[in-house]
Image (spheres, rainbow, N blue to C red):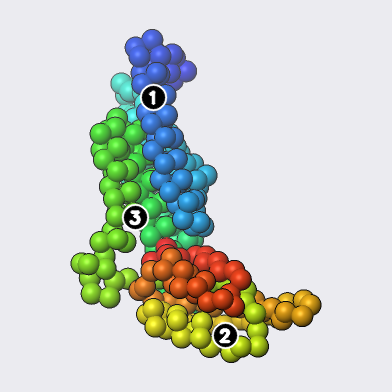
Amino acid sequence: MSGLAAPLWDMQHGQGPRQLVELGLALLLSSLIGWERAAQQKSAGLRTHTLVGVASALMMEVSQHGFSGVLGVDGVSFDPSRVAAQIVSGIGFIGGGLIFVRRDAVRGLTTAATVWLTCAVGMACGGGLPVLALAATALHFLVVRGYPRLLPRLVPGGAASAFEVRLTYRTGAALLPRLMRICTRRGFRILRVDVERLPGGSDRVARVALEVEGTGDPARLAAELFEDDGVAHVDITGAADDE
């Protein structure tokens, strides 16, 4: 049988529809993981994770079925696991590009690990292991969503998060020092302070960006900062553990 006839043979024996289902499952599961990362505003989001998962599944399909046309030819042999091994090695380039160091703190490790997991989920789908792919996706949500809530109870002090607090407030009442004290009282360390005075009428308004790091709850911090009458707006971005 020629290599061109092999895919047609697969379609006649039900291989083609099964492979399409496996690719579809990889699309669904990797999209779910990517959606969660996009909801957390990570650098690798929906499109990146979806493409990684589908591509991994496709390469597994090619590894298993793409060379069936040369089976039985004298002097020709192949090992399907070699392609899988190269997928694992190749995904390291994407994961490595997501990791960076800022102020002696390593960021992006969780996102890089999630891309690696998405690759494994896609490989499981393409390798005909849908139960493992579904289980790994469920475990992903357990780890990234459940562990941050359990960590403060399991590990004293929890894991430090770094994020930015943007405040708009009225000047003239020594409000900024009070706001900074609230941050430190909540267990956050202030890494950077940028103040910008905004043009206005009788009310003098300023905008400040505080880069903070700590183990406290960013939502509670925002709520306490907003309780001050002089604060007009509070926005928190980039809250993450090591992501």
**In this rendering, the label closer to the viewer, 2 or 1:** 2
Residue at figure coordinates x 47%, y 77% from the top left: 212
Q: Which mark is residue 175?
A: 2
- Tag 3, which secondary structure? helix
Residue that label 1 marks? 21
Task: State which quarter of the image contains the C terminus.
Answer: bottom left
Task: State which quarter of the image contains the N terminus.
Answer: top left
Occupied quadrant, residue 105: bottom left
Q: Position of residue 134 (x, y in %)?
A: 30, 37
The residue closer to the viewer here, 102 or 221, is: 221
Q: What's the amino acid at mark 2?
A: Leu
The residue carrying pointer 2 sits among few (fewer than 14), some (14 to 19) or many (20 or more) residues within 10 Å by Cα, namely some
Task: Tell which circle, 2 or 1, labels the residue nearer the N-terminal end.
Answer: 1
Residue at figure coordinates x 31%, y 61% from the top left: 148
Task: Tell which circle, 3 or 1, labels the residue nearer the N-terminal end.
Answer: 1
Residue at figure coordinates x 39%, y 83% from the top left: 185
Q: Position of residue 150 (x, y in %)?
A: 25, 61
Q: What's the amino acid at mark 3?
A: Val
Q: What's the amino acid at mark 1?
A: Val
